[in-house]
Amino acid sequence: MAGVVIVGAGQAAASAAAKLRSSGYSEPITLIGDEPQPPYQRPPLSKAYLLGQMPLERLWLRPHEFWAEQQVELRLGTRVEAIDRAAKQVRLADGATVGYQHLVLATGAAPRHLPAAIGGALKGVHVVRNLADVDGMAPDMRPGARLVVIGGGYIGLEAAAVARKLGLEVTLVEAAPRILGRVACAETADEIRALHAAHGVDILEGIGIAKITGDDRVTGVDLADGRHLPAELVIVGIGVTAEAALAKAAGLDVDGGIVVDEFCRTSDPAIWAAGDCAVFPFEGGRMRLESVGNAIDMGELVAANIAGEPRAYVPKPWFWSDQYDAKLQIAGLLTGHDRVVTRRAGGFSAWYFRGTTLIAVDALNDARAYMVGKRLIEAQKSPDAAAIADPAIDLKAFL
């Protein structure tokens, strides 16, 4: 048998490979990654790793010897160029081919770049996604340097927080009316904005950029209203797109990502997809989730299905964001909410309701609110909204 070939070497890929072996799968497993490193954690890259608080070897998801012990062949620094579905094999950049019985696409997502025509390719302009990105920006993160962060989502805000910790002068520019516009309510955004203001970040909202200035290296950012922000470096955090080109070229269904069914199988029954690249059925539509939890769960589910333990994927979304010494924890999905109730009891939390149904919780420095909210959402229990807002009521009473 040709066994399983996994394309990608991130969290979903590593989870799939490990789960296959723990499920008793004994056929060959080959994991192919285009980076030279073994599977590693991405969230600490732009935080603890960039701050010098986490050495490289602590990023590894598994020790080096794990992969050999589990008889998982790692082919690193290698790009898959094409999938031959008829022959059931993948072609690598060096011309070699690897056959498969099952193919798992865990190709992740790629950061959006600004066009070169407006300065996106200048030296000193960075994105944050992989180890090479962070290693590339580290020399520019000098105390006193002026940084402009473009994008007020979690990536941009986390980058701003780390830069301030390193002593840079930071301005964050968000084209939308407010930061976190697509991923959090206005109340949560207000808390995060105040947090950054307290640490000296200048946040400009509702203003786009015209171009990044400089001849060879960045010198600043021209805003759409005519203002100029001098800068020695720029970090672009304007979202990511699913890495689905390989799947599309192979004729698989692609729609904002690699389309899978409830078992994470693509339109080809021998090919599966998991993690940031996969679009799965959800509440009568389709959804793509970018999170560590989703990558782990989908990777393990694909492995279980391949190993003969079939089950459908039921997402249990959870996320987190570390900024300065604050931790924002999120459970559920806010899509379709029509009411937000806030609570202050030690920390801050925002509870999202659709009608009378609790669908999501943001908890800032409030681990209890996060844990209770997550358990309620997963159990499909909805507390009274007015009672949630009362700090005198112990949240555990709702369980």
Image (cartoon, rainbow, N blue to C red):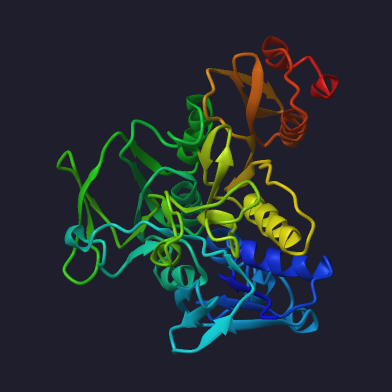
Find residue 14 and report its horizontal and vertical position in percent: 67, 68
Q: Residue drawn at (77%, 32%), measured in percent from left and top?
A: 375
Residue at 25%, 64% (x, y): give it.
218
Q: Tell me the quadrant of the picture where the C terminus can be found.
A: top right
Q: Position of residue 43 (x, y in %)?
A: 59, 58
Snapshot quadrant of residue 217: bottom left
The single residue placed furthest to the front in the displayed view is 86
Identify which residue is drawn at 28% across, 70% down: 123
- Is 216 above or below relative to 296? below
* Lateral position of residue 353 relative to residue 237, left or right: right
Residue 326 in sight in this render: no
Numbered disc total: 0
x, y percentage for residue 84? 47, 75
119 to the left or right of 348: left
Image coordinates of residue 108 in percent, x first then y, are 52, 61
- The answer to whether residue 228 shows anywhere in this view is yes
| Relative horizontal placement of residue 201, taking residue 380 as reference (left or right) | left
Whether residue 373 is situated above or below residue 342 in the rendered picture: below
Q: Quadrant of the N terminus?
A: bottom right
Q: Nearer the viewer, residue 8 or 61?
A: 8
